[in-house]
Image (spheres, rainbow, N blue to C red):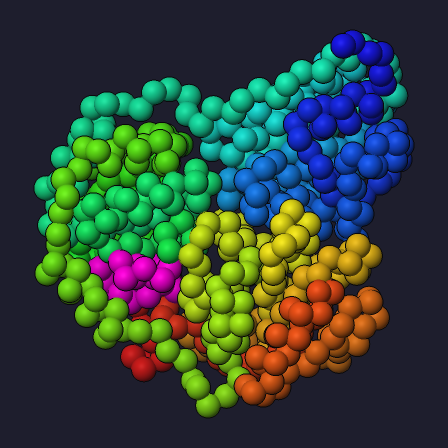
Amino acid sequence: MTMKLNGSEILIECLKEQGVDTVFGYPGGAVLNIYDALYKHQTEIRHILTSHEQGAAHAADGYARATGKVGVCIATSGPGATNLVTGIATAYMDSVPVVAITGNVGVPLLGKDSFQEVDIAGITMPITKHNFIVKDVTKLADTIRRAFLIAKSGRPGPVLVDITKDVTGSETEYTAQAPMKADTVSKPIDEEALRMAAALINASEKPMLFVGGGAVISGASAELKELVEKIDAPVCDSLMGKGAFDGRDSHYTGMLGMHGTKASNFAVTECDLLIAIGVRFSDRVFGNAKRFAPNAKLLHIDIDAAEINKNIMSHASVVGDAKEVLAHLNPLLHQAEHREWMKHVAELKESYPLSYHTDKLTGPFIIETLYRVTEGNAVVVTEVGQHQMWAVQYYKYKEPRTLLTSGGLGTMGYGLGASIGAKISSPDKTVVNIAGDGCFRMNMNEIATATRYNVPIVQMVFNNHVLGMVRQWQSLFYGQRYSYTTINDCVDYVKLAEAMGAKGYRVTKKEEVEPVLREAIELNIPVVIDFQLESDDKVWPMVAPGAAIEEAFTEEDL
């Protein structure tokens, strides 16, 4: 059926084609026509007005990570568009499918330093999979459709569509279309590469799996579990890989890298084959590239050929979607038992457990209590820093898409917006955002968004009155010169929460943690909990920057 519609109405119809039910945004002059169309279609597409455009970008990101669907955010031209940049870059680094829609000045005003004009396509070119500027209304529908297809195809990522204001008001014919199916791979899996991978695995006596975000994105958990049980190998993961493999399983050794477990770091150093699935080998993982996994051959499985041999050289590789590759690889593998190797790894886990001071209120204790209270079923969102590392060390993630965190960009201020997006996408799940006080104050205005729509998130603030992770580095590597990392001021987060319409709690003792968490979750309203922690607690283990991962040290080692 063909209809004559203006550009804004075409945009709404295209969003409906793609199954979009929620968008996050902030209105302005260049998108007034779009917002007028949203008003007319508010029963079909829910618009969440955030407190800041950055919050909208992070909310779209959290919505996408929690569901695997494409998240959508909208901003006006100029500063509205540039306020999306950090959120777009966050999604890009972690391969999150987001479509960001911005308005711009009319075509006759482009390039003339017009009011609130900025070249947002040029600005975001390095941090998007692709971006478009639409200057012709007849091309709008196809552009929106392409944007969604690109965002979710292959290795996902953000796409920006910049639409001039005259296009949003111009009319043309619109014909509805079914959304195009996204392809996970651009070409068939190489059979020879599969055979080589199988030969390496079948010959290995000390195999080890290293699992990353690609395994989460592809939904490869079942195939991954089959692989682990078939080859009887230990499993470690990256920050982004949490939940792809059950963190409660006996084969699991914990996270790898700078704040990974000693068991994982030592096992990777000793293994004879490292099977890396959907990882990009961040510097926070490998430490010293020349000394990483020195005894191992490396088999790298990834959907993005550009990741192969980018940071760490591989002996063999298979390019393709992790789920699809493992489905083809598993039948080629022999059933194996590696009793001595698994016994040794179990001894490493027993000899080097995670530990913390139990005589005071600490971040790890709070995380362990949260795990017990939620029975491991919460969607945990984090900001970036010490609290983030404690959240991945002490909470056991048994399913994918239950940890949402900024891994690649390390965005302070990410979590609150993302938790709102996650809770709106998954209303039946308990959603908590764990923040340090430094991170929380970056975008704490989004508490007003949560209360405006009664989005019942639990905002946990690990309030140690310092920028904890930066202070940790200053303490260990900068002679305890705490240059501008102390934020011990007069901000009262309980009063702040109440001023924004949320329930506020302050926790100062260990025995208060569990009852407050239980009550906060049961209230089913936006809650902020101010946990008062000491300033000098540190994340252990740690690998010094540039050191080999087997040189991980703890407080006891010092």
Residue 537: x and y, percent?
Answer: 48, 79
Residue 161's image quarter? top right
Residue 255's image quarter? bottom left
Does the magenta segment cover residue 248? yes
Residue occupying image coordinates x 10% and y 42%: 203
Does the magenta segment cover residue 483? no
Residue occupying image coordinates x 73% and y 57%: 455
Magenta range? 247-267
State the quadrant of the N terminus. Answer: top right
In-front residue for pair 493/103: 493
* 431 is higher (above) or lower (below) than 507: above
Residue 358 seen in render: yes
The residue lying furthest to the bottom in this view is 359
Residue occupying image coordinates x 82% and y 11%: 3
Give the side of residue 551 with respect to residue 97, left or right: left
Give the side of residue 30 with respect to residue 210, left or right: right
Residue 122: x and y, percent?
Answer: 66, 30
Residue 31: x and y, percent?
Answer: 84, 33
Residue 116 seen in render: no
In-front residue for pair 273/67: 67
Residue occupying image coordinates x 63% and y 54%: 428
* 305 is higher (above) or lower (below) than 2: below
